[in-house]
Amino acid sequence: MTEALGTHYDVVVIGGGPAGLQAALILARHRYSTLVLDGNRPRHSATLEAHGFLTRDHTAPNELRRLGREDVEAYEDAEIQFAQVSRVRALSDEESAGAEASQGAAFEGAFAFVAGGVPAEDGSSVSTDPREIASRRRGGVRVPYRFAVEAKGVRGTPARAVFARSVILATGLTEVLPALPMLRAFYGTSIHSCVECDGWTQRDRRVSVIAAPGVTDLYERAVQLTRFTGALTVFAGQGQLGALQEFDLVDRGVVVETREVVDVEGGPGGVTGVALADGDVVTAEAVFVRPNYVAKLDFASELGIDFDGLGLVAADAHGRTSVPGIYATGELTGPGPQMLIVAAGNGAETGMAVDRDLLGL
Ligand SMILES: Cc1cc2nc3c(=O)[nH]c(=O)nc-3n(C[C@H](O)[C@H](O)[C@H](O)COP(=O)(O)OP(=O)(O)OC[C@H]3O[C@@H](n4cnc5c(N)ncnc54)[C@H](O)[C@@H]3O)c2cc1C
């Protein structure tokens, strides 16, 4: 991890997945002091291989993140720390002015010994006044410190309390899987949630689809999976398939089951079946689950950002939220769960937007 441990940053990025790290890379390359705080508990850590990321197909997700951190940390203006953010709040005008002044004091400590300024190349003298140094270093930034971010250390890393001009929320989603006791044992290897990521992996096998209560896109998932297998069983809970949808699935060769699912079964080689309440077990070599997804942002509740009807953060195409200076990127914004490369693309968009906004463009 980077050693800087500063208190004032142009941008604090919360979350070090592909979205947050990509945003940080763009910003560090634009010479913004950028701190990434990452709890390091990504939802894809259940899986051994990530698929579909150009040049990194089949790379372990944790290795992908390590490589990402290495790219970001190569820049002198970037710092990454494992820490769980517990609070983000807006500064009052008074606090904001105090943060500016205290940054000046930090510079004063570093430069006070150069009485009368430092000589410039043209023979003149460059002022060492801390506020002027701070303003030169900012390179055109027109935005004051607006936010305070607090984080708890994880596994021995220090707690942090820092000021930021802008904050990027890149904390991903938490998934609520169907409540089946053995599901976690196979999740990421022979039970998956992302059809685009793992449909190919499970091609031509006996596949089942199970959705969490309240899920409304079971039909779409099932149709997507018909690209990969001709042996597909869909377990539809109450109200999860309309009559026309069920008819269409049967027409596509899909078996539709309405009996209640109580668990999955399997062994060292992976999942082998779906256990039903009536005692039957339906053979399955792979299962796709459709979880419910939640954007957990309790730490940012004081900011008052808007959410959309699905519980995701409402943001424009560049990640600007309803609160100026607060951005949201990656899959905690619409349309929600997606692929690594899409999240990274979102992060790049947001990094560029933050640059423009900090410059007042
Ligand atoms: C089992 C599984 C397999 C997958 N396989 C693939 C695949 O093969 N290919 C593919 O393209 N996609 C895959 N995905 C999807 C992919 O993981 C996501 O699309 C992607 O990780 C989203 O990126 P993100 O940066 O938005 O969020 P995440 O990668 O989830 O990163 C969010 C980060 O924020 C951190 N965080 C959360 N709250 C806080 C806080 N308060 N303070 C500090 N840090 C915090 C988390 O610890 C985490 O590190 C898979 C997903 C799962 C669940």
Image (tube, rainbow, N blue to C red):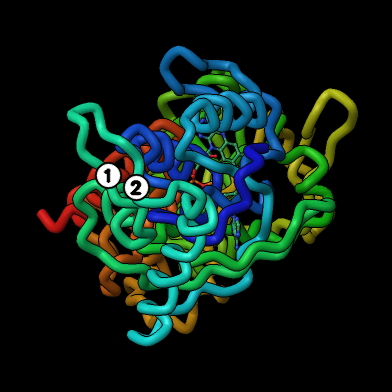
Where is the N terminus found, in terms of image quarters?
top right
Q: Quadrant of residue 79?
A: top right
Name the residue at 83% across, 51% down.
Answer: 155
Judging depth in this view, the residue of 87 and 105 nearest the camera is 105
What amino acid type is highlighted by mark number 1?
Answer: Val
Question: Against 132, is 16 above or below?
Answer: above
Cα separation between marks 2 and 1 = 5 Å
What residue do we see at 29% from left, 51% from top? 127
- The three-letter amino acid code for the residue at tag 2 is Gly
Sequence-first tag of 2 and 1: 2
Q: Please, which residue is most extreme toward the right here? A: 268
Quadrant containing ligand 1: top right
Residue 90 image point, x, y percent: 41, 79
- Vertical comparison of 29 with 299: above or below: above
Query: What residue do we see at 51% from left, 26% from top?
Result: 74
Kindly check if marks 2 and 1 are in contact, taking CB atoms under 8 A apart as contact: yes
The residue that mark 1 highlights is 126
Position of residue 257 measured from the top left corner of the image (x, y, whole percent): 58, 51
In terms of secondary structure, where does tag 1 sit? Answer: strand
Q: Is residue 352 above or below residue 215?
A: above
Residue ID for mark 2: 117
How busy is the neighbourhood of tag 1: few (under 14 within 10 Å), some, or many (20 plus)?
A: some
- Image height of 69 relative to 52, above or below: below
| Image quarter in which the C terminus is found | bottom left
Q: Nearer the viewer, residue 198 or 206?
A: 198
**Residue nearest the observer in this picture, 121 or 72:** 121
Which type of secondary structure does the marked residue at label 2 adopt?
loop
Residue 297 in sight in this render: yes
Residue 119 place in picture, x, y as percent: 31, 36
Marking on residue 276: none
Q: Residues within 10 Å of mark 2 (few under 14, many from 20)?
A: some
Query: x, y percentage for residue 249?
Result: 40, 42
